[in-house]
Image (cartoon, rainbow, N blue to C red):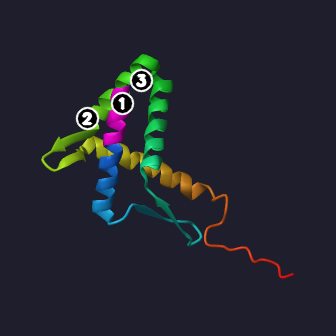
Amino acid sequence: MDKLIETYRRRILKAALLRHLRKTGSNCIIINQPKGEIKTIELTEILLDGLLSRFEKQAVSEFGNIEGVKAVRGIYSNAVDVNGRGEFLTESGKELIDDLIAELVDFAKKHKPAVAEGKHVKSAKL
């Protein structure tokens, strides 16, 4: 991708993290599993960067290189704005991030972690 998209991606993810922190008081998402289990996912810059990069790759594969990059630029430029207190997500930016997080939550509900969280392996006494 180009530098403009990278700049917008960085602005979007920082605004999204700040929005989630203000909204929930945390950077974690709590996911209720089907059997009553609870799973948490921490939203980080790396995670959101990966979600946005995946979105960009999908757009390029769907629309082609030139049209995909144009589409991503347009979506990203409308997703974030600046006011006196800093950058914030617009309504379209909130929708983009909420959709990406919803996909992440659906994925987390369907897949079990590679290592069970909260379970410790008992060591054998020699």
User: In which quadrant of the rendered image does the N terminus lie?
Assistant: top left
Residue drawn at x 43%, y 55% is 43
Neighbourhood count class around disc 2 (C-alpha, 10 Å): few under 14, some 14–19, many 20 upward: some
Residue 9 within the magenta-colored segment of the rendering: yes
Q: Position of residue 81 (x, y in %)?
A: 21, 40
| Disc 3 residue type (three-letter) | Gly
Neighbourhood count class around disc 3 (C-alpha, 10 Å): few under 14, some 14–19, many 20 upward: some
User: In which quadrant of the rendered image does the C terminus lie?
Assistant: bottom right
Give the mark toward the camera: 3 or 1.
1
Q: Is residue 13 above or below residue 4?
A: below
| Residue that label 2 marks | 78
The quadrant in which residue 33 appears is bottom right
Neighbourhood count class around disc 1 (C-alpha, 10 Å): few under 14, some 14–19, many 20 upward: many
| Disc 1 residue type (three-letter) | Ile
Task: State how far apart marks 3 and 2 are (Cα).
Answer: 16 Å
Q: Is residue 38 above or below residue 88?
A: below
| Residue that label 3 marks | 68
Q: Which residues are magenta?
A: 3-11
| Disc 2 residue type (three-letter) | Asn
| Residue that label 1 marks | 5
Residue drawn at x 35%, y 22% is 70
Q: Earlier in the sequence, mark 3 or mark 1?
A: 1
Magenta segment main secondary structure: helix
Task: State how far apart marks 3 and 1 are (Cα).
Answer: 12 Å
